[in-house]
Amino acid sequence: MTLKVSFHGATKIGKTNLVKRLDGIKFNEDYKATVGVDFILFNTPENRYQCWDLSGDSRYESITRLYYKGSKIICLCFDPRKKESFYKITADIDRLKTYVEQDCQFVLVETCSDLEGSPQVSEDEVTQWKIEHGITYHVKTSAKSGDGLEQLKDTFDEIFRAKKKQKERHEEKTTEDQQPVLTLNHSEPEKNHSFLLDALFATAAVGGIGLCVAAIVTAGVVGSIPLAATLLAGGVVLGAVAAGTFFYKRNNQNREEEQYIDTNEVRRTQLLI
């Protein structure tokens, strides 16, 4: 896979030499402004990169803005000896964010770190700027001496390792969310057993109530106390059968629910492991 990196910054700050040095091209003392866009390809042990050198000249903005699309990294370049180059990336960063996807990472790149001269941008200013704009990565480089080139490549690899891990975690979470929910599936014998219990409960309850009513009627109307007592005893027995059936079913349901909860806990534990 070829990963796209774009370099943005003011003119005459060494962007072109920096990009070419990443591909092993020798430093060129003669300045030649980039007209529009240019790009190189280079490899690290982990990835292949397509680096775009985009002109910092505002005359080419209508062209260069098209080339930011698809960038996974944008290097914001400035020369600490030139305050205006720092102002440029400050003015442009919000606009650049509209050209790329949300997960695009920005890297602050100082150029010409080996050259003499009083810096016009202090370390405190740079630190505060990174905090304000949420920039994590910052590399000091020199296209002439080669300082910082390997660190810049390592930074690219580090960013893409983090992206890969984030993608893997997202895929794992998606897989977990798609796991089927465990349900209480009853076999046919269990369903038949439950049906018989329901039938027994209904019969016993209705029969018990019926015998009790018959006992009351017999005692009050017919006046046969022995027969009424017999009917009442039968009603009590059927009532006891109905009550026993009810509590037996409720206990079975509680056990099934506990087993279901335990099974789900085991599943969640396995997913976490």
Image: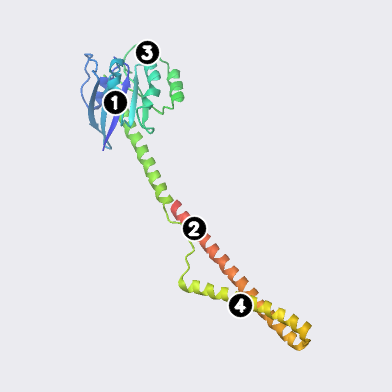
Labelled disc at residue 84: 3
In percent of the image, x 24 and y 15: which residue is there? Answer: 33
Amino acid type of the residue tagged 4 in the rendering: Thr
Label 2 neighbourhood size at 10 Å, few (<14), some (14-19), many (20+)?
some
Which numbered disc, 3 or 4, marks the residue that appears first in the sequence? Answer: 3
Q: Which residue is mark 4?
A: 203
Amino acid type of the residue tagged 3 in the rendering: Glu
Q: Secondary structure at mark 1?
A: helix
Which numbered disc, 4 or 2, marks the residue that appears first in the sequence? Answer: 4
Task: Give the x, y percent position of residue 161.
Answer: 34, 38
Labelled disc at residue 34: none
Amino acid type of the residue tagged 2 in the rendering: Asn
Which numbered disc, 1 or 2, marks the residue that appears first in the sequence? Answer: 1
Depth check: give the residue in front, 239 or 56: 239
Depth check: give the residue in front, 271 or 193: 193
Q: Nearer the viewer, mark 4 or mark 1?
A: 4
Q: Nearer the viewer, mark 1 or mark 3?
A: 1
Q: Which residue is mark 2?
A: 264
Label 4 neighbourhood size at 10 Å, few (<14), some (14-19), many (20+)?
some
Q: Secondary structure at mark 3?
A: helix
Q: Nearer the viewer, mark 3 or mark 4?
A: 4
User: Position of 255 compared to 49: left or right?
Assistant: right
Which numbered disc, 1 or 3, marks the residue that appears first in the sequence? Answer: 1
As measured in the structure, the alpha-carbon distance from the residue carrying label 4 to the one carrying label 1 is: 81 Å
Q: Is residue 209 visible?
A: yes
Label 3 neighbourhood size at 10 Å, few (<14), some (14-19), many (20+)?
some
Q: Is residue 273 visible?
A: no
